[in-house]
């Protein structure tokens, strides 16, 4: 049985301090797991995104020319970075928490004095950190193909943090309801991947016919990609405040759902 190593707080520690120690312990365990299997968590997305830059940015992009007045290579950089962050944040927590369920050591967390927000926060923090690590790697790869400027660093950082948090929470919900390992893969394959590819990563929504443009505006990933594109390129197909309102709303809704599932023990207690 896998156990989470903990450093017991002093006897006179306040409940808040004890909870922060527990939160840091869970997050540290997640980061250690990510780094221990770096060849599975960090290398594959780097290779995949390099191929995207070579094929779409280099070969196809040279024929496309510009998109909304921006070279095609520069246009796809924000979308590819955001896509890697979303996929890796989601995949990390869904596989890690389901593994804890499968190994039955999640029960140790449930019977401990840790409140649900500590458990959820620890796993989400680990997933967000993996998303950020992969995002930085992809951004560094992009610098090999084009000049990357960040005219709006606060928008860039806040967007990637909110996007990673949203899909970390979504991955947690998926892991809670999953009954077998195949259930963890269903959402990324049939929902997450189509939404990502149809979220304006490779094209401007202005190129679509009216009905397709309206359908794209119902895709939450479209708003995240465009907010991140504004941070890197200073250009977006949607108002920035709309993107932030949507992202904050998803964080609140999915966070509340995750806490409720932990409190009720849905899919966790046998």
Image: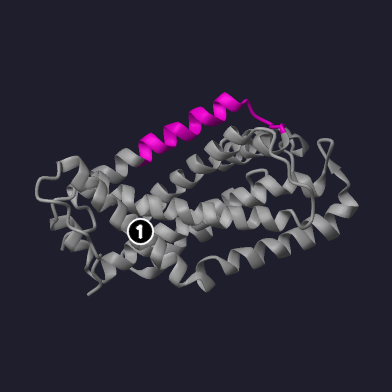
Q: Residue at x 46, y 72 (%)?
A: 37
Residue 66 on the magenta span: no
Asked if residue 139 lies left or right of residue 101, the reply is: right
When the figure is inspected, residue 37 is found, relative to residue 162, above or below; the finding is below
Report which quarter residue 224 is drawn in.
Answer: top right
Q: How is the image coloured?
A: one colour
Q: For the image shown, how many numbered marks are present on the structure?
A: 1
Position in image of residue 14 (x %, y %) = 15, 41
Report which quarter residue 105 is drawn in.
Answer: bottom left
- Tag 1 residue: 28
Position in image of residue 199 (x %, y %) = 63, 44
Q: Residue at x 64, y 29 (%)?
A: 238
Asked if residue 153 lies left or right of residue 25, the reply is: right
Residue 125 visible in the picture: yes
Q: Residue at x 54, y 43 (%)?
A: 160
State the predominant SS element of the stretch in magenta: helix
Position in image of residue 235 (x %, y %) = 72, 32
* Element assignment for label 1: helix
Q: Quadrant of the C terminus?
A: bottom left
Asked if residue 27 lies left or right of residue 78, the reply is: left
Residue 202 visible in the picture: no
Q: Residue at x 24, y 65 (%)?
A: 5
When the figure is inspected, residue 70 is found, relative to residue 126, above or below; the finding is above
Range covered by the magenta-colored residues: 234-254
Residue 242 on the magenta span: yes
């Amino acid at each position: 049985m896998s156990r989470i190593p903990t450093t017991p707080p002093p006897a006179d520690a306040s409940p808040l301090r004890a909870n922060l120690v527990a939160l840091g312990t869970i997050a540290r365990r997640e980061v250690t797991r990510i780094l221990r299997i770096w060849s599975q968590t960090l290398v594959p997305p780097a290779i995949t995104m390099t191929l995207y830059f070579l094929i779409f940015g280099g070969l196809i992009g040279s024929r496309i020319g510009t998109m909304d007045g921006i070279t095609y290579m520069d246009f796809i950089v924000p979308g590819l970075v955001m896509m890697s962050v979303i996929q890796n944040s989601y995949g990390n927590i869904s596989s890690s928490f389901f593994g804890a369920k499968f190994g039955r050591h999640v029960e140790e967390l449930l019977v401990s004095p840790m409140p649900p927000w500590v458990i959820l926060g620890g796993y989400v923090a680990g997933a967000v950190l993996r998303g950020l690590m992969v995002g930085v790697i992809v951004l560094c790869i992009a610098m090999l193909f084009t000049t990357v400027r960040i005219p709006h660093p606060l928008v860039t950082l806040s967007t990637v943090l909110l996007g990673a948090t949203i899909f970390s929470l979504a991955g947690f919900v998926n892991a809670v309801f999953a009954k077998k390992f195949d259930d963890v893969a269903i959402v990324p394959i049939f929902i997450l991947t189509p939404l990502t590819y149809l979220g304006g990563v490779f094209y401007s929504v202005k190129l679509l016919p009216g009905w397709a443009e309206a359908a794209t505006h119902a895709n939450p990933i479209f708003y995240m990609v465009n907010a991140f594109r504004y941070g890197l390129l200073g250009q977006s197909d949607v108002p920035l405040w709309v993107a932030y309102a949507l992202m904050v709303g998803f964080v609140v809704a999915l966070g509340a759902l995750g806490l409720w599932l932990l409190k009720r023990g849905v899919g966790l207690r046998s």
